[in-house]
Every structure is written in C-alpha cells, then in structure tokens.
Image: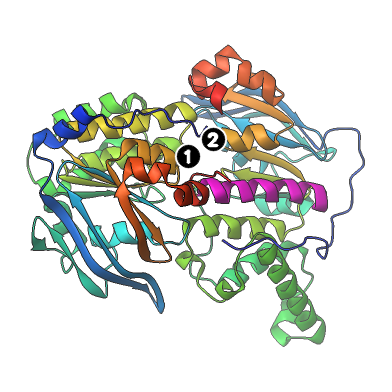
Amino acid sequence: MTEATTAPPTQEQTDHAGAGHRGDTLLELTDLHVYYGNIEALKGVSLTVARGEVVTLIGSNGAGKSTTLRAISGTHKPRTGTIRLAGNEIHHLPAHEVVKLGIAHSPEGRKVFSRMTVFENLQMGAFGRGRERIDDDVARVFDLFPRLRERRSQKAGTMSGGEQQMLAMGRALMARPTILLLDEPSMGLSPILTEQIFSIITEINGQGTTVLLVEQNALMALNAAHRGYVIQTGKIILADSAANLAANEQVRQAYLGEI
Amino acid sequence: MTEMTDVADVNPAPRPAAGEPLLVTSKVTMRFGGLLANNDVDFEIPRGAIVSLIGPNGAGKTTFFNQLTGLLVPTSGEIIFDGSSIVGRTPHEIVEVGIGRTFQNIRLFGAMTVIANVMVGRHTRMKASWWGSLLRLPAVREEEAATRLRARELLELVGLRRRYEEDWAKNLPYGDQRRLELARALASDPKLLLLDEPTAGMNPGETAQMTALIKRLRDELDLTVLLIEHDMKVVMGISERITVLDYGEKLAEGEPEEIRANPRVIEAYLGKQATSA
C-alpha cells in the first residue's frame, strides 16, 4: 500500500489553506541542539512553519524527527537553540504552558491515559482551555472518528492500538491548536483508515490548523504536505516543496522505498 | 540502519516433524463484558509457514495473540500447540513450550540496557539455581557469559548496532526498539514467533529489510511465524496464508491473491487502493 491516495494540494487549496493568510512564519526553530544523556539527537536543527501550512519532516529511524516534535511541545527540552511561536520564544516554557499557547502534540506511541475513558481522555485534551464548553469539540472528534463515539465510555487502555491512535489525535485536536504536531498518525491503522487519516489532516488544515507532520509513510505525507524537510542523523539535509521532494531521486531512494 | 549479519552461527532450533499443524485453535471465544472480541475462531498454522492475521482496527487481532501467549485465557475454546493444549497456562510456561512474541505497544524494560533486555529473554532457557546465582558458581558464570554472547549474536542478527549494547532501551529510536523486541523474543528459542506489527514505525526501506529478515528467520532458524501487520506490501510479500478477522470473527482465509481479490476484505479492510498494493 504505497500508492498515493490523497491528491497533492492544488493551487487553489494552497492559496486558501489556513483561511487565506498562509505566509507569515508561525513556528521557527533556530539551531536546536537536543540531547538524551550524552547522545546528541539534534545537531543544530533550524526550520520554519508558516501559518496555514502542512509541513512534513522525513527521515530514517533515529534521525531526530520525534525529538524535534518533543522539543517543540516542551516535553524534552533543547540544550541550546531557540523555538519561537509567532515571534515569541517558547523553548523555556513547560509543556502545559506550550499547549495553552496553541501547540498540541499527538505523540509517538500514542500515550493515551489508559485508565481513563475515551471521553475523559478527550476532556484532558481540552484541560488548558479552562471552563470553556467543549461539547462541540467532542462532537467534532466523534464525527472524524466514529469508532471513538462507539467506545466513548470504554477505558482507553482496553482499546486496540489503532483505536488508541485515533484517540491520541482526537485528544490533540481538543486543545483547538493553532499548530498540530502529529507523530506518525497512521501507525497501526488499517489501509482504509490510513487513507482516511490523511484526508482528515487535509480537512483540518483546510479549517485553518497548521500541521507539522512526522510520518514513515513518506509518500503519503508528501502528498498531504505543502513543504518538507529531510532530516538525517540530527541535521536537516534538504528543504523543498513537497512536490519537489517527492520527485527528488535521492529522497525516492532513501525514503520512498524505491531502488 | 545497519546490515544484518549471517545467521549461520546461531544454533538452529531442532527441526519439527512435518505433518500436523504447529498450532490449532478451535472455537476460540473471548468476551470482555458485553464485547465479543473473538468469536468461535478456528485457525491453524502449518509448521514452517509464515501466516498473517489482518483486519480492521479493533477486530480482535491482538486479543487473539494475547490468548495464544497466555496473557488472556479464552472464555471458551481450545488452543493446541505442538500437540498439547496450552489453555490456562501462564505466559512464562508458554514461552517455555516455545512461543515467543513481540508487542504492538512496545514493552521493553526501558531502564535496562539493550543487551540485558535480550538476556532476560533467554531466562527461561537458563539453568542456574537461586543458590548458584547467589554464590556466583563457575557454572553460573559460564552460563551467563554464554547468554551474553548469544544476546550479542541476536542483536547483530536483527540489525542493531553494537554501540547500543550498554544504552538504555528507552533511548533507542522507535524502529530500533521493535528490532530489540524481536531479538528478545528470539532469545527464548521459540518454535512459533508471533509478531505484532513488526514494521510499524519503519520507513519503506527499513520495512523491506525487516521483511527480508522475517523470511530469513523462518528459513534459517526453522521458525514458524504468525504476524499481525497493516502494511500490505509486507503481508502480501511474505505470507503463505492470510486470515482476516472482522468484529472478532473470521471474515476470510486463503492465499494472498485470494485475499487481495476478496470483495468483502476490500470493503472492510483494504479499501479501494487494494489492487495497487
């Protein structure tokens, strides 16, 4: 199942994505260095995401994709370098403050609250929003993932892996993020649901949410994205439009599984 | 990603007698309160085969694995492995009779080193007594050294770089954690290897390598393999037989070509892109 299922963004989509004001830089990473103990996982990563864009980060296992997302969401602090959201530095903030500023993270390995129900997990996603009403948001998530509606009162830990993946994404959406960080949203999903998840990403983006997407299914990610970065052993080695990256011989060989 | 080394130097498990299937389940049913997660599943795995279990999310695939490995006891039904029933046996007893597995939601010992994770996998094959371990008798030390050696071979085999050996498992990239789980499962010298989404979190290149490795393990270690996988390139590429579960029941069963063309499977699971997989 490597065939493209999502159409590449057309000119019209591109122009209208993000409610029409795609362009100004929303997120900016500058010379980010991140360590796990003594292991340097990011060796000076710089990248930008403009408002309204879908940007994808492509790379092998261990290249630093998930680490980049963790640094942005404040769940793993960079040692040096800066992260700016709409011009303001956020890399010193704890994760719960970062969420409040509009960055939601659907992490690798799902990390749902396994002893809480589906509904409670979704409530947790909206935690930073205080006393606002969230019924409409819950309904929206259930519309995107009807399976979650069926399982509303079930403990998350008893659901299948794929269902937990849907919940992780739904929980992130509950924060009404300005920018959504998605770490392998298709992991563990059936072929049909994988197709659906990519159209959901396009749909969410069409409604104005900016998306930074990490995905092993690089071809599908490039089809859903406007731009992409290729990361290799902690360094960005290539940055281009998604269309150009998908056509790039080097990328095709290394990440799209073509020999 | 590193290359896989030769498997020739790893001791092959004794070759099982051909003939009857290695594993047979009849009418396996698992009920969680009002939810029927598996319903009357009849299933078998021929010795030496690579068989895949596919189906929509929540169809009951992992639940089925959990019953084969003793993590869940079927509400009703029978599971015969290598000629005897394993229903009601504990997970460690099932490892002892020769079923090894990996987990979809990776379950490594995060704060243990990579090599120690593999050595733990070998525990059931080690003979050291409690007193022997306490007194560090020569035989115990020898056995531990041999286990470490074997663990190292297995790490090489699954393509994990040597430099990881003393790193904490939780610091490995996701795809490498999957390889480590495979090495740990192999350390118990299984006859039947159950792999729950072995290529999740791997890019197409790494997936192709994992696919080739699974084939080699079967051929060179005389393993029988049952896998759950959503990547149709993997499933169609290495399975001799495929069973499809939907809502806990068997929806279809057959060779890859039959499954790929089955309209019910396309509708429930594969989607319209099926023909291009």
| Residue annotated with mark 1 | A188
Identify which residue is drawn at 38% across, 66% down: A234
Which label number is shown at residue B230? 2
Q: For the residues marked 2 and 1, what is the alpha-carbon distance in whole angstroms?
A: 7 Å
Question: Is there a contact, CB below 8 Å, between mark 2 and mark 1?
Answer: yes
Residue A120: x %, y % from top left: 26, 40
User: Subunit of mark 2?
Assistant: B
Amino acid type of the residue that numbered disc 1 sits on in the rendered structure = Gly
Q: Which residues are magenta?
A: B202-221
Residue B250: x %, y % from top left: 62, 21
User: Residue at the top extreme?
Assistant: B263
| SS for callout 1 | loop
Residue B240 in the image: above or below residue B176: above
Query: In this view of the protein, can residue B70 be seen by the observer?
Result: no
Q: Is A16 displayed left or right of B131 in the figure?
A: left
Q: Is A173 displayed left or right of B160 in the figure?
A: left
